Image (tube, rainbow, N blue to C red):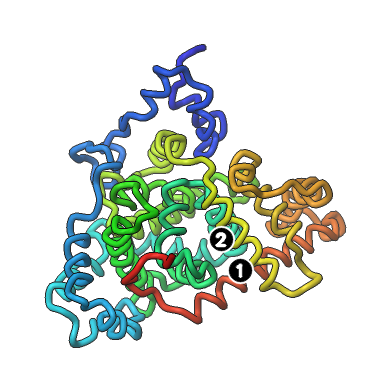
Amino acid sequence: MAELSRRRILVSGGALGALGALGMASPAQARSLMEWTWAPSGSVAGSGAGDDPRWVWDEEADPLVASLLDRGAVPEVNRLLRDWTRNDQPLPEGLPEDLRAFMESARQPPSWADHGKLNIAARFNESRGLYLNLLNGVGGGMLSTAIPKEARAVYYSKGGADMEDRVAKTSILGFAVGAPNAYRPGGSCAVEAVKTRLVHAAVRHLLQQSPHWGGGIPISQEDMLVTWHTLPTFAMRKMLEWKVPITAAESEAYLHVWQVTAHMLGIKDEYIPATWDAANAQSAQILPRNMGPTPEGVELTDILLGQLAEQTSPGSISRPLCDALARYLVGDQVADWDGIGREPVWDPLISSAWPKLVKFREGLIPLPLVPQVAWVIDEAARRYILFYLTKGKETKIEIPTTNRPG
């Protein structure tokens, strides 16, 4: 077999085309894919130590949150932070001084944040909201359950016991990123990113105490990068595949808002890709070694798709349609890993109708050519987004103090 180069991985299908790379490669090639070779020169920092991100965590947040948990301070911290919701809002009085100092620093966007690009990204998120929310919601959700470490971390942490609440809390950050005022004073993205960073640190500390975990320290820098690639990298690849018209400025701006968000979540700048080419190259290296099936992932997938079918109006969307839409978004390999059944009626209908729906929404084809099934799919997508938006408004991101019971 010819050498399996990164270029061939990218050409074969972009970020997710690399998922089969380990199975295709020889043992020597597989070992090379397991090595960290992505150069920090391709990052927003432009340089770095080049350490393998599998063995790097959050050196600022981790000891701080572990101390808060050991001191029993987290319940009061959660109470104080519950109404801290705006980027321009002062931190509440009464926070422990070490936590306050960390949060005052962590809430500041990086020096390289470009507000012009963030404004373009806000307009892009608004005009392409249906695609982005569907890809980040259904698509990102199904990809996350096909990441063994992430699926197991979710399942055995506190959120795994109440997936409806867990999904709602995840959606809060996602919709904050896509909001028109994400990083403006009245927005909430900096707030929700900092809260999420604290949650990650708590899970790192708590999961190691779970008798069900046994996986070392969870949520490494690589784990966060893998999740990051299931969101903007995946979404951009799919939109290009669907031939959604995107200008160069919009593409760069959409990447930028997620670069800033990665920084705010505690990902080191030397790991944050500077360009889409760098993002695709990094994704092609780390997704193959981090994706696959698990019993926990299959169970979480069933819960997530079941919630969608249950929460939306009866008759307008059903579980078979949910399954078919998820399979269409993530492809057969990930869908099979997730235990998503094949739908002989809906699978071909969605594959045929969705491209026509995209063309219609972009004004590229007239109304009479859009089949009725496309409108059903459009309604399904809208209701999915409404479900996540509604649930997101009913809860707050809070630092956990326990793992999943039992």
Residue 152: horizontal and vertical position, in percent?
A: 44, 52
Residue 137, numbered label:
2
Residue located 39% across and 17% down the image:
28
365 lies left or right of 217: right
Q: What is the three-letter code of the residue carrying label 1?
A: Ile
On screen, 182 above or below 223? below
On screen, 390 above or below 257? below
Residue 103: horizontal and vertical position, in percent?
A: 21, 71
**Quadrant housing the C terminus:** bottom left
Q: What is the three-letter code of the residue carrying label 2?
A: Gly
**Residue 235 seen in the figure:** no
Residue 385, numbered label:
1
Look at the numbered disc 1 and give the secondary structure of its residue: helix
Residue 273, numbered label:
none
Label 2, label 1: how far apart the Cα atoms are: 8 Å
Residue furthest out toward the top: 1
